[in-house]
Image (cartoon, rainbow, N blue to C red):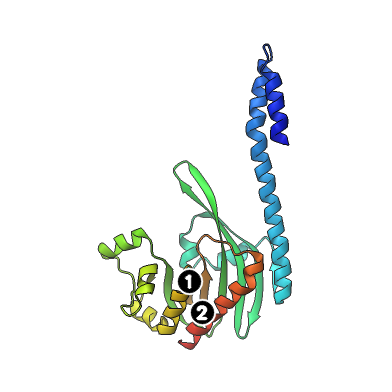
Amino acid sequence: MFITSCQMMLFAAGRPGNTPWLAFGIILLIVLPAISLAIAAVRKEKRRAADLKQTAESLGFEFVAKNNSDYLKSLKSLPLFARLGRRQKILNLMRGKSQSFEVTIFDHNYVVSAGEHSHTRRQSIICFESQVLALPEFTLGPKRFWDKVGNMLGRQTIEFDSHPIFAENYALRGSDPYAVRSVFTDPIVEYFEQNVGYSAEGSANRLLLFKANKRVPPVETAAFLEDGLKALSLIHSGG
């Protein structure tokens, strides 16, 4: 509707003697679509927040849509939050308990730059926290081209010869490879082989599970939590 109206104005402004109106019409054609996209994006985020609030209520979780900067600060010691982008935000935070574990599910936004351009990346994360966890620091994510190059240059990932699917799809690293191997027993490695796409990080009393740069739709949050609890159970029990 807006674009059609602008096109009509631009056509009228194109007549001789209407140069100022022509410039104005061109500006409108550029600006209005951007405004429309911005409004649509805001509405989409409001719908997501409303849907996640309902999801949190159904799970019996607390919900905080914004102003989660203190929680973000508490995560800065984890590699994921120390290395990723700038202008990080935690939104749509859901917090509850499962047995002796604090469970927090949230949207994590951060900005990455490439030359003069920047864009926002978004992902859903589950954080499990409990004093009964005692994890070595590790990062597990999809194996990319640069991981393979790093292996050739001596920056080795932790691999398991008996699990070629895991080795093909994942890059696992940690400051203490022996301790990390003791966490990744056969059942845990097989879990990630069956759920290719998930990433995980662990450090001390915290475990994160997420799909890098992907947000979980509100209707899939319960299934996301179930997947996380399964991984937690395997890691906590030693497989």
Does residue 158 lie above or below 115 as drawn?
below
Residue labelled with disc 1: 200
Q: Locate residue 170, reporting x and y percent.
A: 39, 69
Type of amino acid under label 1: Ala
Is residue 129 visible from the viewing direction of this image?
no
Residue bearing the label numbered 2: 231
Crowd class of label 2 (few under 14; some 14 to 19; many from 20; radius 10 Å)? many
**Residue found 54% across the figure and 81% down from its top:** 230
**In the image, residue 39 lies at what x, y percent?**
69, 45
Q: Residue 223 location in percent, x, y?
A: 61, 74
Circle nearer the N terminus (2, 1): 1
Element carrying mark 2:
helix
Q: Residue at x 47, y 62 (%)?
A: 82
Q: Is 160 left or right of 122, judged from the image as shown?
A: left
Looking at the image, which residue is at 45% across and 87% down?
238
Q: Are marks 2 and 1 in contact (CB under 8 Å)?
A: yes
Which residue is pictured at 39% across the width and 78% down the height?
A: 180
Given residues 73 and 106, the one toward you in this image is 106
Furthest residue to the top?
17
Q: Quadrant of residue 25?
A: top right
Q: Amino acid at mark 2?
A: Ala
The count of marks equals: 2
- Left or right: where does residue 96 sit relative to residue 237? right
Q: Which numbered marker is on residue 175? A: none
User: Callout 1: few (<14), some (14-19), or many (20+) C-alpha neighbours within 10 Å?
Assistant: many
Q: Return the residue nearer the eye: 65 or 40.
A: 40
Horizontal side of 57 relative to 207 (left or right) equals right
Quadrant containing the N terminus in the rendered view: top right
Secondary structure beneath dot 1 equals strand
In the rendered image, the vertical position of residue 131 relative to residue 203, given as above or below: below
Report the Cα–Cα distance between label 2 and label 1.
9 Å
